Amino acid sequence: MAVYLAENIDINDLQTLLEDNWDIKTGGEIPQPEILVSRGARFDASLTWASTPRPGFVNISLGPITEKQAGYAYDCADQEAIATLDIRVRREGAITGGSGRQYLHDVKQELRRIIYSNKHSLANWQIMEYIDFTEEYERSNDIGGSGKITVKLRNQAIAAGAELVDEDLFNRADAAIGGEWTQDSGTWEVVSNQAALQSATADAIARFTAQTFKANQRVTVDIVTVDSMEAGLIFRFVSAGNYWLIRVIETGGVKFIRLVQVVATVETQIMEMREPGWADDDIIQVEAALQNTGIAIVYNGLCIFMLESTVHQAGLSYGLYSNSDQLTRFDNFGIFESGGDGR
């Protein structure tokens, strides 16, 4: 999909995320607090405490949103906002280690767990980062307390140009890949309306000849995964031994997205991100957005790598890559103009 700057965060999404994922790892041991949303932190007078123990609350408030823009026609943007989670708990009848406990430590740890395990799960923001936690206790035995978690919400994005230059949806009869493709190494085919490497070949490349060649374009492809795979997207291709590669790979039981530079057949890994995991027949999308010396790599709508490089800047071709991987499929290959609406 195209990558656009996110709309302003709706912190009701964060409230829903916390409620839907509460205490799923501890068997109902930690009672869910009342999770609220307001413009600023509030203190509930009803928690000046009744004789019957009751759950506390977590109030979510959102600070100002800041944005940095850069690049041609504001191609790149980095938005940030701080969300504050104010926690107040007290269970006078709770017993240490007993069921139904709701100590500040328990609530804090559960909130942190949800944030860590769902950092890409907000509907309209890309990244959540846990920043800090402060706490105060009313008693030394931790029965009552108040705390504050601060979380940074971030969206790093590329403003997507709307103009399609060329594409291949592979929606044709099974045969050799044909069309606008050059098979630089390996034998490639269209099978079941997707592209794939037909015969096992190390560092196999199928290169696309676009109708319009420009240095500043976006290229994107969907990769239909297998659990163990090594495939990817090539951009700024100069020759079979000189290009850039977004490599999607499982190695040693761990899955990675890697940005690789190939110069005179020598590979140099420039950046790497560990991927939480895919299974057979998942669909992931990779994209290279190019503008002059700027390179941005987008993975499933998330801008994961950004850098400046003049290496292979004159390379105007794009293609598919497979390292003897005949099971991985490719779909929805597209080339777009670079830049946002202001170009």
Image: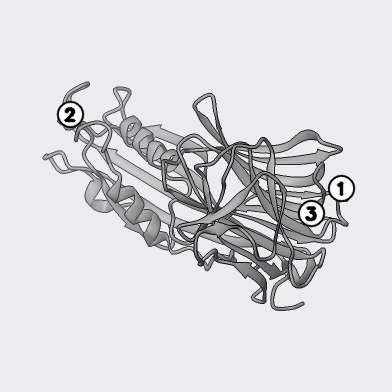
Q: Residues within 10 Å of mark 3 (few under 14, many from 20)?
A: many
Disc 1 on helix, strand or loop?
Answer: loop
Q: Please state which amino acid type lies under the numbered disc 2.
A: Ala
Give how far across and how far down residue 289 sits, in percent: 71, 59
Pick the quarter of the image with the C terminus.
bottom right
Q: Residue at x 47, y 36 (%)?
A: 134
Tags 1 and 3 touching, CB below 8 Å: yes
Front in this rendered view, residue 253 or 78: 253
Front in this rendered view, residue 1 or 57: 1
Seen in the picture, residue 266 relative to 294 is either above or below; the reply is above
Name which of mark 2 and mark 1 comes first in the sequence.
2
Residue 290's label in the rendered image is: none
Give how far across and how far down residue 165 sits, in percent: 69, 73
Name the residue carrying label 3: 236
Name which of mark 3 and mark 2 comes first in the sequence.
2
Pick the quarter of the image with the N terminus.
bottom right
Disc 3 on helix, strand or loop?
Answer: strand
Name which of mark 1 and mark 3 comes first in the sequence.
3
Q: Please state which amino acid type lies under the numbered disc 3.
A: Arg
Q: Residues within 10 Å of mark 2 (few under 14, many from 20)?
A: some
The residues tagged by marks 3 and 2 sit, at their Cα atoms, a distance apart of 63 Å
Of the two numbered discs 2 and 1 in the rendering, the one whose residue sits closer to the viewer: 1
Name the residue carrying label 1: 311
Q: Quadrant of residue 145?
A: top left
Seen in the picture, residue 237 relative to 73 is either above or below; the reply is above
Coloring basis for residues: one colour
Disc 2 on helix, strand or loop?
Answer: loop
Name the residue carrying label 2: 94
Seen in the picture, residue 270 relative to 187 is either above or below; the reply is above
Q: Residue at x 24, y 43 (%)?
A: 32
Tags 3 and 2 touching, CB below 8 Å: no
